[in-house]
């Protein structure tokens, strides 16, 4: 009888020794591309989300990639008035990590409604737009990561300063916390790095407000953009970037950012924007991404990561303003590590 019991116990041990308990990440990976239980299956993840504004109702374009109940990254593009296309390289790095991310064209941008009313182009209204998008996508503090690049970084900071209770994590990429500080950096550091003759010609066009002159754009693209926006020859720029430039809403861009690429100038509404004094109130885990050749001062970006209460700095030594393209070897490992560290409770700031 004793032998029979021992054999039975051994058989039970053998049968169950090969059965591993499914971990959450295993389940997430298995279901990452399963759209069968989603209400956006028929559109491949695309949703036109209705939003309410002070002048009426409109719709904005979003597209979800993947399923992950714990990590959902809403992407805020730059500009303002550019498009989600600046982020399309994420397709090559985040799916294999089972990270869900959401493309989003803000109101006024190419894939969303484009009302022609300057009363809409305020940071305050854009913040409320993001909040409406969050609710429509059912994002909350258990899964909601907000990532903003350039102007999107301004919007991400403003959103977090008002609604950080809704966030699990915040990513500020390639954006300083002060427009005057950015202008100072552009004027005192970036401009003088250009060939003096080229810089003088650019300044002459700007002095004459001849911003639509093809030669002005040519000089910027050839000598400034390839140094500080995306560090590749223009003929090697990815199609996603060239498409986004073609799709820019210049009315929104000039109204908020201004016509110059060497700072926020003229009557641009963002000219005096500055939240440096308020950053210390942010407690949400925060990643700040800066790059050596960026249009934004990387030292200021590092300062932001120390000013917030729970920050980390990711430095891209080969990158520029679009370091997601020209320094992917540092950008994506750092971004992915942040998302997973926060998710697993291993985020300890620096």
Image (tube, rainbow, N blue to C red):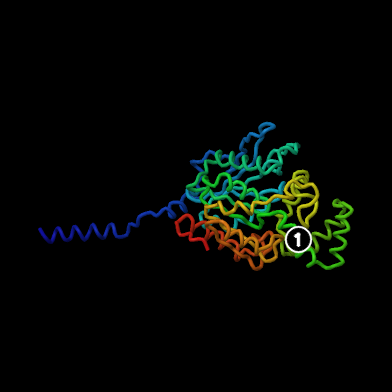
Q: Position of residue 1 (x, y in %)?
A: 10, 58
Along the viewing direction, whichever of 76 and 27 lies nearer the viewer: 76
* Residue position for label 1: 186
Q: Who's the residue at 79% across and 59% down the image?
A: 221
How many badges with numbers are in the image? 1
Where residue 294 sits, quadrant-wise, is bottom right
**Horizontal side of residue 197 vs 117, given as left or right:** right
Which residue occupies the extreme left position in the image?
1
Q: Residues within 10 Å of mark 1 (few under 14, many from 20)?
A: many
Which residue occupies the extreme front position in the image?
277
Where residue 194 sits, quadrant-wise, is bottom right
Along the viewing direction, whichever of 338 and 93 lies nearer the viewer: 338
**Horizontal side of residue 186 vs 29, given as left or right:** right
Q: Position of residue 145 (x, y in %)?
A: 54, 50
- Please tell me whether mark 1 sits on a helix, a strand or a loop: helix
Q: Who's the residue at 66% across and 63% down the image?
A: 298
Q: Who's the residue at 81% across and 59% down the image?
A: 220
Which residue occupies the extreme top position in the image?
56
**Horizontal side of residue 14 vs 163, given as left or right:** left
Q: Position of residue 178 (x, y in %)?
A: 68, 54
Where residue 315 sits, quadrant-wise, is bottom right
Along the viewing direction, whichever of 313 and 212 lies nearer the viewer: 313
Q: Position of residue 265 (x, y in %)?
A: 79, 52
């Amino acid at each position: 009888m004793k032998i029979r019991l021992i054999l039975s116990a051994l058989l039970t041990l053998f049968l169950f020794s090969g059965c591993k308990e499914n971990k959450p990440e295993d389940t997430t990976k298995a279901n990452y591309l399963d759209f069968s239980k989603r209400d956006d299956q028929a559109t491949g993840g695309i949703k036109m989300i209705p939003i309410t504004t002070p002048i009426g109702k409109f719709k904005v374009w979003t597209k979800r990639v993947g399923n992950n109940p714990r990590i959902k990254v809403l992407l805020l593009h730059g500009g303002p008035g550019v498009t989600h296309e600046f982020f399309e390289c994420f397709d090559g790095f985040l799916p294999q990590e089972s990270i869900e991310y959401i493309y989003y064209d803000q109101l006024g941008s190419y894939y969303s409604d484009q009302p022609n009313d300057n009363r809409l182009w305020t940071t305050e209204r854009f913040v409320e737009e993001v909040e409406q998008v969050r609710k429509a996508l059912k994002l909350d503090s258990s899964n909601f990561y907000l990532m903003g690049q350039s102007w999107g970084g301004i919007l991400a900071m403003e959103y977090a300063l008002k609604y950080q209770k809704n966030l699990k994590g915040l990513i500020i990429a390639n954006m300083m916390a002060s427009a005057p500080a950015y202008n100072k950096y552009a004027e005192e550091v970036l401009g003088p790095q250009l060939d003096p003759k080229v810089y003088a010609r650019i300044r002459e066009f700007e002095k004459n407000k001849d911003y639509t002159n093809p030669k002005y754009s040519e000089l910027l693209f050839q000598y400034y953009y390839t140094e500080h926006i995306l560090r590749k020859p223009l003929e090697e720029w990815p199609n996603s970037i060239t498409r986004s430039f073609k799709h820019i809403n210049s009315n929104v861009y000039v109204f908020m950012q201004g016509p110059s690429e060497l700072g926020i100038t003229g009557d641009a509404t963002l000219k005096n924007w500055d939240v440096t004094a308020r950053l210390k109130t942010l407690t949400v885990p925060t990643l700040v991404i800066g790059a050596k050749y960026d249009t934004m001062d990387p030292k200021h970006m590092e300062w932001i990561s120390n000013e917030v209460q729970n920050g980390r700095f990711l430095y891209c030594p080969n990158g520029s303003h679009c370091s997601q393209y020209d320094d992917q070897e540092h950008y994506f490992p750092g971004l992915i590590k942040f998302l997973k560290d926060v998710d697993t409770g291993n985020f300890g700031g620096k």
